[in-house]
Amino acid sequence: MNIQQENIQKLVERRAKAKLGGGEKRIEAQHQKGKYTARERIAMLLDEGSFEEYDMFVRHRCNDFGMDKQHFDGDGVVTGCGTVDGRLVYVFAQDFTVTGGSLSKTMSEKICKVMDMALRNGAPCIGLNDSGGARIQEGVDALAGYGEIFERTILASGVIPQISGIFGPCAGGAVYSPALTDFTLMVKNTSYMFLTGPAVVKSVIGEEVTQEELGGASVHATKSGVAHFAAENEEEGIATIKELLSYLPQNNTEEAPRRETADPAGRVDDALNSIIPDNPNKPYDMYAVIRSIVDDGRFFEVHRGYAKNIIVGFAHMNGRSVGIVANQPAMLAGALDINASRKASRFVRCCDAFNIPLVTLVDVPGFLCGTHQEYGAIITNGAKLLYAYGEATVPKVTVTLRKSYGGAHIVMSCKQLRGDINYAWPSANIAVMGADGAVNVLYAKEMKAAATPEEAKAIYDEKKQAYDELFSNPYQAAQKGYIDDVIEPRNTRFRVIRALEQLSGKKQDVPAKKHDNLPL
Ligand code: HXC
């Protein structure tokens, strides 16, 4: 073997060793926990053979607490770029087999390097988290490393899509890394996120709680809303991230890719003409409407288990990626509450940041009332959604199916919030409030003064009928141009598609400012 061959042989050996991370025993332990390694996850995510790895030979620089004797090439994270369905992405995957994936200063430098590249080259950045947090032996260096990652995430926000997959522990301040990104996915039973773990919780407030109960995927996907997706296993988690990418552009100067479809743009669906029940208090399933109007009935839902009274997610319409926001009358009658407002406003802003048109389907009786909502700041939270729609400059097409009352009518992408095309079904009711509430407010005195309950009921019935005739339809709004057209439900798909085609060249400015001051 000559010198060159020896050098090459050394490289091959070093690469092979680096690829083992913390070694075979720890890889085995990782598998025993039902988890994949960082490299296996990257292999599942990226197109075969596309991974270009960087910093495979980087080592940490800590000499305290015996760390001078523990060196692993690459340290605790695998970083680089590759393609997903042929489109460039940057990726970092924490390697739990190396000191529990804990974050060293050099690890943060590796992560920051790919984040900088992603931002410079206008491609999404995907972080696969599986880490014990800041590397304890490194002290403040590790904290500084987190700070540098956070700052980059903030600067890249709204420029490139940033997606976090949580595939193991993510605890302490480290949770803010995914929390700053656009989407967070967790895997059920093997991942958890919390600021303080069960042991500290018990000692500080005496509460006994398991890791899963405190910060498992199911908790964050249903109760806190921290996780947008909860996958059954890692394979499903990676597949979800890949599908999510297919709805997003590479960056904020581009459009999302089109997806070819054989579903005709002009397809009508007669079933929609009879989907609204005669009884206005009876629910129906908004998912059926969404699936009916989007390409191939394919709807990619975000935040499926959280605030189910509003539905948000992506779909394609005639090949174009769209963000759907829809009230769900089958849950809390579709009323807007704190969680629904937060969920939808985040989604609307995300679509607006990444040039994805918004299609809003409205059936909303109003905001949820009561002390719980008021004390929790429904005012501020509802204002977030109002703000998000009002500032959004992407094409906005709204269809009012049934109720659209009061403040909730304004919030749900109405004309005055720069809604571009606002349609209503003939079943739409656009008013300050429903007939029952209105009559009880306007005629309370007359009904109270009535000689008998029958007389009071007669007054109620008469006034309700008058109110219904005037307001319980879309025509008052249509007469004034607040609704652009009243459409037959069966035609909704092609009318929305036609509106989106028309709006594809839309340009709208906002006044120059440093940044807005939305009601956080
Ligand atoms: C250094 C760590 C580590 C850490 C784990 N390890 N976390 N080393 N710093 N933060 C090491 C372990 O010593 C062990 O090394 C290996 O990783 C695997 O860990 P195990 O404990 O054996 O694994 P497991 O039983 O699965 O438990 C995983 C764990 C636990 C739950 C994550 O390790 C743990 O509680 N770690 C500490 C978590 C923590 O408090 N982190 C700080 C959070 S605060 P060997 O050599 O034995 O295999 C934070 C601040 C961020 O992160 C601030 C940002 C602003």
Image: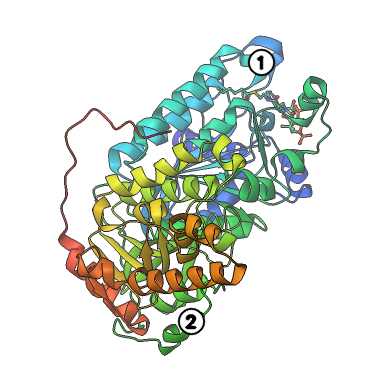
- Around disc 2, counting alpha carbons within 10 Å, would you say few (fewer than 14), some (14 to 19), or many (20 or more)? some
Residue type highlighted by circle 2: Ile
- Residue 428 screen position, x and y as percent: 38, 72
- Residue on which disc 2 sits: 275
N-term mark: 2 or 1: 1
- Amino acid at circle 1: Gln
Which residue is located at x 54 percent, y 41 percent?
12
User: Based on the displayed image, in which of its 4 quarters is residue 205 positioned?
Assistant: top right
Query: Quarter containing ligand 1?
Result: top right
Disc 1: which residue? 137
| Secondary element at image label 1 | helix
Which quadrant is home to the C terminus? top left
- Whole-Å distance between the Cαs marked 2 and 1? 62 Å
Q: Is residue 165 visible?
A: yes
Q: Mark on residue 35?
A: none
Q: Quadrant of residue 231?
A: bottom right
Q: Position of residue 371 (x, y in %)?
A: 60, 40
Element on which disc 2 rests? loop
* Residue located at (41% from left, 89% from top): 270
Q: Residue sitting at 45 percent across and 51 percent down?
A: 344
Disc 2, ligand 1: is the CB inside 8 Å?
no
- Work out which residue is located at the far front of the displayed protein and give it: 451
Residue 51 x, y percent position in the rendering:
45, 49
